[in-house]
Amino acid sequence: MTTTVRRAAYRTFMFIVALALVVVIWETYKALGPADGGKLFGARVLPRTSSYAMPHVWDMFSRFNRPEVRGSDRTVFSAVLAGAWFSFRLSAAGFVLGGVLGTGLAVLMARFRWVQRGVLPYLVVSQTIPLIALAPLVVSWGGKLEVGPFVWPRWLSASVLGAFLAFFPIAVGTLRGLAAASASSVELMQSYAASWTKTLFKLRFPTAVPYMVPAFRLGASASVIGVVVAEISTGLKGGIGRLIIEYAREATGDPAKVYTAIFGAAALGLTMAGVVIVVDAFVMRNRPKESIS
Amino acid sequence: MKKRSVRVAFASIAALSLLVAACGGSDDAADEVAEETTEEVVDTCVTPTPVKLQLQWFIQAQFAGYFAAQDQGFYEAQCLDVTIVEGGVDITPQTELATGNVDFAVSWVSKALASREAGADIVDIAQVFQRSGTLQVSFKDKNITKPEDFKGKNIGNWGYGNEFEIFAALTKAGLDPATDVSLVQQQFDMVGLLTGDIDAAEAMTYNEYAQVLEAVNPATGALYTADDFNVVSYEDAGVGMLQDAIWASGERLASDAAYSDTAVKFVAASLQGWAYCRDNVESCRDIVLAKGSKLGASHQLWQMNEVNKLIWPATGGVGVIDEAAWNRTATLSQETKNLEGGTVLTAAPDAGAYSNDIVTKALEILAGLGVDTTGSSYAPITVTLNEAGN
C-alpha cells in the first residue's frame, strides 16, 4: 500500500514539475526570443513574443478571477467550469455512444471475416471526412427527427459528432485485441466445444483488455475534440467550445482571456482520459500484472 | 443459442443508447419549440404561431431589434411565439431557411442572392440595414485612404461571402483581386492588424472597429484612438452592398397564405423592435447583455449606436427595399470578380428576389400603432469605449 501511495505522490510531483517546466520555457522564450519571431524561407517557424502571440502565464491565470463581463458576479473561472461540465456531459454521452458502436463493430468484424473486409475500409474513409463538413448536417437533425415521443435535441448532435470521432480508435483497437488470443488458447476453447460467444466472453475479451484500454483512452479524448469542434462549428451554447470562440473574439483587447477557455478544454480532455484510467484500474484490480506480448 | 445471444446483444445496445439519450442532460430539449398545429385566429390570440428566426452570428446588438421585440412583447402582441436561433461558424442562414429548419433568416443581400442563384428559393422581405457597415481599417502610417491604395498590400478579409465589397472596390479601382493585392484570411479578432501581419483589415463599424479602439496601444499605454487609423468606408467608396435583411421562403409565400400573414406580423413586430432600440439605446444594450452576450457593455452600446446609424434615418420607411440600392448591390455582384476570376452572380437576380409587399403591410400595422417608421429626427449618441469593451 505504501508503495502505491509513494508512487502516486511521485507521479503527482513529476506532473507538477513537467507543468512548471512548460511555464519556464514559455516565459524564457517570451523574455529572450526574437520579438518578431523567426522566419525560415519566408515561413514563420518561431512565434512572436508579443502579448498578442504569447501572453504572460500569470496574465492568463489572473483572468480566471475576473468577472466574465463587467458588473456580473460570475467569474471567468465559474464560467469555464460550467462550460467544461456541459461539454463533459456531451462528451461522455458521445464516448458511450462511440464505445458501444466501436465495440459492437469490432465484435462483428471479429466474428465475420466478410464484415471486416467490407466494413474496415469504410471506417478508415469515415475518418477522412472533415468534421466541419458533417457538423451543420448533423446539427440540422436537431428538433427535426422525431421517433415517437423522442425528439432529437440539439445537444445530441454534438454528442454524435463526438461519437463519430471516438468509435474509430475503439473499433480498431478492440478488433486487434479480440484477435490477440493465442492460437493455443482458442484451440483449448474449441476442445471444450465452447460456443463462439462463450469464447468471446471467456477468452477474447479478457485478452483484449490491454488493447482496449489505450483505444478507449484515445476515444475519450477524441470525443472531447468532436464535441468542442461541433460546438464551435454550430454555435451550440453552453459548452467550452463556444466559450473558446466567444473569448477569442475579445483577443484584440484581451489576448490572455481565451487561454482560460483553452485550459478548460485541456482539463476536460484530461478528465475524460482519467475516467478511463480509473475504470481500467477498477476492472483490472484482480488481474495479475502482465505485459502485452 | 446463437440466435438468442445476438438478440441479447442487440437489446443491450438499444438499451444503452436509450440510457445515453436519457442521461445526457435534458435541459436543452425545452429550448426547442414543439411543432404545434395552429388554427387561424382572427382577432384574439389563442395559440401563438411558432416562428423560428435564424441569425447570422452570436447574440449581439447587431440583432438587438429582434431581441427587443421579444423582450418588449411586440411579437406576443402580434400573436407570435418567436424562437431566435443563434448562428455559428459553419451555419449559413440562407441554407437553414431554404431547408426549412427555420421560418425566417437574417442574411446579407449579396450572400443570399448567391444562394438564390444556386437554387435556394428565398426572398428579401425587409431590408433592415439600409447602409453598409463594412470598413477597411489601417494604421495611419500605411497611407491607405482609398481602395486604389490597396495595391500591393496585405488586405485582410473574412471570406465566406463577407469579402464581396472588398472585391467590388478593387474591381472599381481597376485592380485584380487575384494578382494586385495579397489577400489574407482574417480571424474574428483584429490582432493581425495590430501585429502588422495585415496592412488593412476588414472591420464592421459596429464590431471589429470598436475592438481596435478597445485595445491598449503599447506605445502610449492608453487605448488606441480613431486618430491612429485610416478608414476606408465601402459605403462612401460607392461599393456599399445591402447587408442585414429578413429573408423568407419564396415557396411558402406563394403557396401558404397563413405564412404570408405570419411574415407581415413578424416583420412589423421586428421593425417595432428596431424603432424601440433607436429610441432606447441603453435599454436595448441591457436586453442584449441579459440574453447572455459575452461582449462587454460599452462594446454593445457602441454596437447598438452604430447599427442604428445603418438603419436610421430611413427616409423610405424602415425595412423598405430601396430599388436603387438593391440594383447597385445586384450590379456589383455581377461585375465583381473573385479570386477565380468569376463573379458573385452570373446573371441579374429575377424580379422575385425581393418583395416590398410584406414590409408595406407591416408598416401599415406600425402606423396604426403610432410607431415612427422613418426616424427623421434620429441623432446618434456618443459612446465612450472602455478597455476590452467592458
Image: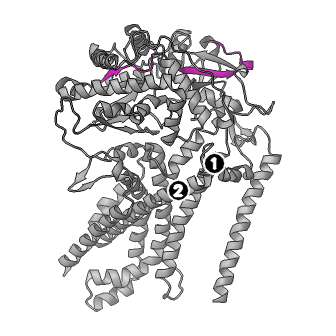
CA distance separating discs 2 and 1: 14 Å
Q: Residue furthest top?
A: B324
Q: Give coordinates of residue B298: x percent, y percent.
A: 62, 33
Horizontally, is A18 left or right of B311 in the view?
Answer: right
What residue is pinned by disc 2? Answer: A82
Q: Is residue B254 above or below residue A224?
A: above
The image quadrant that residue B112 belongs to is top left
Q: Give coordinates of residue B37: x percent, y percent.
A: 18, 41
Q: Give coordinates of residue B25: x percent, y percent.
A: 39, 59
- The stretch in magenta equals B123-145
Does residue A58 show up?
Answer: yes
Q: Earlier in the sequence, mark 2 or mark 1?
A: 1
B142 in magenta: yes
Horizontally, is A291 left or right of B261 in the view?
Answer: right
What chain does mark 1 sit on? A
Residue B382: give its label.
none
Question: Is the residue marked by circle 1 packed among few (<14), some (14-19), or many (20+) residues within 10 Å?
Answer: some
Q: Residue furthest bottom?
A: A192
Residue at (49% x, 36% y) in the render: B287
Mark 2 residue type: Ala
B61 in magenta: no
What residue is pinned by disc 1? Answer: A67
Viewer-side residue, A199 vs A219: A219
Residue at (45% x, 20% y) in the render: B129
